[in-house]
Image: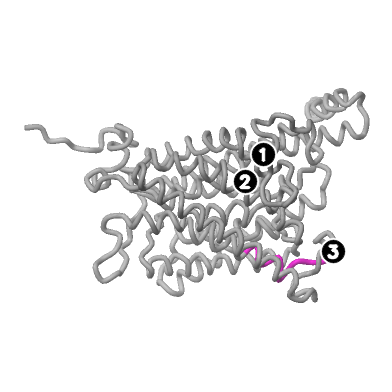
Amino acid sequence: MKRRLTVGMLGVLVLLPCLAAGAEAGGASLTGVEIGLNTLWVLLAAFLVFFMQAGFGMVEAGFIRAKNACNILTKNFLDFCIACLSFWAIGYALMFGASKAGLIGSSGFFLNGVEPVTNGVPTYAFWLFQAAFCGAAATIVAGAMAERMKFEAYLAYTVIISGLVYPIIGHWVWGGGWLSRLGFMDFAGSTVVHATGGFAALVGAALLGPRIGKFNRDGSANAVPGHNIPLASLGVFILWFGWFGFNPGSSLSGLAAGLNSRVALNTNLSACAGTVSAMVVVWVFYGKPDLSMAMNGALAGLVAITAPCAYVSVGAAALIGAVAGGIIVAGVALLDRVGIDDPVGAVPVHGLNGLWGTLAIGLFGQKALLGGNAAGLFYGGGLRLLGVQALGVAACVGFVLLTMGAAFVVIDKLIGLRVRESEELRGLDIGEHGMESYSGFQIFVTK
């Protein structure tokens, strides 16, 4: 009896938001209930994507040295706040505002004049979900430029990517822009979110230069171990958990049971395949089953499946994740070879695998799942969809490299990108924030 009562109470709690939405719509109609369920779904997804900020913070803090952990966590806190404010002021308007040419939106600044309902949910709920995505794109760069970037320079970068660069690319793909009109597909953001952040990280890390001691005079790379692998491991699990809001939430519908289930399953299998693949590859080529590489393999699989999760079969999802795991190992080795220092592997995880996942739609996309678009190459659709996907990623990556390269150069001239050598050696926690992540571990000798 008590069990039935508890279940009944839970059911009432779940239905209350639906009934409230129906009342606002003029009665508990079916449309009102649908809006209520969709709103609940989107808000829960937004909360999960927001929680991914904690995952990013834990991964980045764990993969760097203790003397810089406070600095990287401060950047994670502030980039989300600045991203939300920038997205509210101008980003949302540029991304989802009215546009004739399909290049940039021009209405809805500060959310003024927006329609009350967007894509079947209240616009405020839709905005919150999209703002969480914007924050995720911004925070990717923190890890790649960790341990040597000025805090004020990072804040300036965050305003630019979240207020201008990310929303413009988002408009092209999700805001009715020119790429969406061509048939470019990116369900949850392998290109829009991850490749945007990943290639901004690439150009930033290249201009910033490597950490002191990362590379020898002959160009060979030295390992700079992170200070807390358990913390990084926790961060990966948080990100993995949050991705179940990131991908299924992009349906914007709590009623799309079949779609949401397939997206969630594909997301999980790709992550698992990426983990195993990266572990096997690094074990074969380097002799040890490296946990840090396996964790990045999970993230690589998650990034890669973000674009095609709604358009491919379960088997294809596992294969996409397995390839992503190999890409992460090869990508880390490639960056070391060309002399680019990426302490957490953000460029291969988000940049390279963002491209791979988006192109994978053109290979594995199934016609029945693509909403009328041509199928992928391996399903008899020829090269058309793959060509559109390739054009899309080339345009987006080119735009990011151009705009963020110019932005970092300007920031360097006005503020300076890099801290002083003495500050880098001592640690950014003390130099930038006047505090330590682990107080009492430094020994000061007084005369």
Are circles 3 and 1 on residues that touch, CB within 8 Å? no
Q: Quadrant of residue 10?
A: top right
Counting from the top left corner in percent of width and height, residue 413 is at 35, 47
Q: Earlier in the sequence, mark 3 or mark 1?
A: 1
Q: Circle 3 is placed at which residue position?
A: 368
Residue shown at 48%/59% (left/top)? 347
Q: Earlier in the sequence, mark 2 or mark 1?
A: 1
Mark with earlier residue (2, 3): 2
- Majority SS type along the magenta span: helix
Q: How far, Cα to Cα, is label 2 from label 1?
A: 8 Å
Q: Is residue 317 left or right of residue 35?
A: left
The N terminus appears in which quarter of the rendering? top right
What amino acid does circle 1 point to? Ala
Which part of the image, by quadrant, shows the C terminus?
top left
State the residue lying farthest toward the left.
Answer: 447
Closer to viewer: mark 3 or mark 1? 1
Looking at this view, name the residue that lies furthest to the front. Answer: 101
Identity of the residue drawn at 53% across and 41% down: 53
Looking at the picture, does residue 336 appear above or below residue 434?
below
Reading the image, the residue beneath label 1 is: 93
Q: Residue at x 75, y 64 (%)?
A: 313
Q: Say what amino acid the circle numbered 2 marks.
A: Pro
Please give the range of residues in magenta: 357-367
Secondary structure of the residue carrying tag 3 is helix
Q: Say whether marks 2 and 1 touch (CB < 8 Å).
A: yes
Dot 2, crowdedness within 10 Å: few (<14), some or many (≥20)?
many
Identify residue for label 2: 167
Against 395, is 118 above or below? above
Count neighbours of disc 1 (C-alpha within 10 A) and say few if under 14, some if 14 to 19, many if 20 or more: many
